[in-house]
Amino acid sequence: MGHSVGEIAAAHVAGVLSLSDACRLVGARGRLMQALPAGGVMVAVQASEEEVVPLLVDGVSVGAVNGPRSVVLSGVAGAVESVVGRLSCRSRSLVVSHAFHSSLMDPMLDEFRAVVRELSFAEPVVSAVSTVTGQPVTSQWSDPEYWVGQVRSTVRFHDAAQRLLADDVTTLIEVGPDAILTGMLAAHLPDGVAALPTLRRDRPEPQAAAELFGHLYAYGQPVDPDTYPPVTAGTRIPLPSYPFQRERYWLLRDAATTTAVPEPKTAPVPAAVDLTGLDDDARADRLLALVRTEAATVLGHGDPSRLGADRAFTDLGFDSMTAVELRSRLSTALGITLPAIAVFDHPTPRSLAGLLLDQYAITAATATSADTDDLDLLAEVDRLDAALARNTLTADRRTAVLARLGEVLARRSPTEPGPEPELLHSADADELFAFIDDQLGRAARPAGA
């Protein structure tokens, strides 16, 4: 599948378009769009499509549905702003030249149609999913009108991704210059499914390629080492464009080589963090240090102290992919589940550390509640024992209660061979309650009891 103009690249890979025709289609699309009058906007909102659609007005379209609560509105600036204001949710204006996938694209469609009809289309030879329909491609990509309508239609990226998951796809690879789509996917994928980027804008290409191949191998995908891109001498490297941060960037060399290529670095697995025995202030300090350390690891910085506790993650260099990576590392370190958008909802290291402190308290309280439930169960058994000992039940009622207890114990007792089942058939009341106390109370007794 492909997102917006990326669907043309997907059609080429699927054998629908030749490389020359795909390039011609992309060129005509871009040229005609740029010739349109400026003035449209696109705004990403944290809301579902069901929430957005009833509020749409003339001049506003749903440009893309990227997730269950990730929608892009596209259209006339004033109209889009009015819809965003009525939603009362988090929003972000996208840096675009035009309002793509909206009615503002209509004036270019006739001329674009003329170009598309001159191209040659074939049937796909690789399975694909359309981001216009969210369904598998049959012959749609071979119809010129599909590509005309695709300019104007909503990009149903989320629907297409869900279809891939329904078809048991377990590894999704983004082929592009950054990890934009990977970040969108990673926040909503179920366990056992991986989304991996080919390249990352914040990492050298050899390192990004090494990480991709390593992840694919770890996920059980076949990897051909001969396809690994070679690193040759004389490779261009970007110089730092930010203020001097007192880190060395000298290229080291030895006697056998003229150019040293840095080894790709892999972030270490986060170590488990134990907060037991600490008061709230100490836990807060420990969690803030953890957030800064893991953030520095994700960004590739050597010194966590350079990451200000109250500085926004976006200012530190985080994007959607690195935000998801940070959330995953913190979840692993603390053994808790964090929301997919935790880093976006808590945009500084200090506020994120506050979320971790709250989540840790909830987890600890849940564990304590479970222990209390075990002790309450033993207390219930003791109360039942005392009630029967008072001998206030009729003989028939007492027999019925004991029979019911025998059924319960028969279901809950260990299944391995032993004397207990035989005991249940002939036990008197004292023996039966001794057995209850032993079986149900064993795990609930505090240490030393």
Image: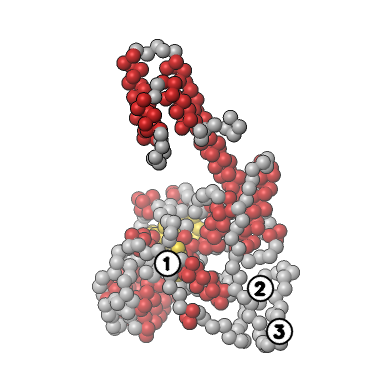
Q: Secondary structure at mark 2?
A: loop
Q: Which residue is the site of mark 2?
A: 241
Camera sees residue 383: yes
Q: Give me the C-alpha separation between circle 3 and circle 2.
A: 28 Å
In the rendered structure, find residue 172 and report the number of the disc placed on it. 1
Residue drawn where x is 29% and y is 76% of the image: 124
Q: Position of residue 305 (x, y in %)?
A: 71, 59
* Amino acid at dot 1: Leu
Q: Nearer the viewer, residue 287 or 449?
A: 449
Q: Quadrant of residue 159?
A: bottom left
Q: Nearer the viewer, residue 21 or 267?
A: 267
Compared across the picture, whether 215 is left or right of 397 comes to right
Q: Position of residue 237 (x, y in %)?
A: 62, 80
Quadrant, the C terminus: top right
Q: Secondary structure at mark 3?
A: loop
Q: Give me the C-alpha separation between circle 1 and circle 2.
A: 32 Å
Q: Which residue is the site of mark 3?
A: 254
Compared across the picture, whether 423 is left or right of 133 comes to right
Q: Residues within 10 Å of mark 3 (few under 14, many from 20)?
A: few
Q: Residues within 10 Å of mark 1 (few under 14, many from 20)?
A: some
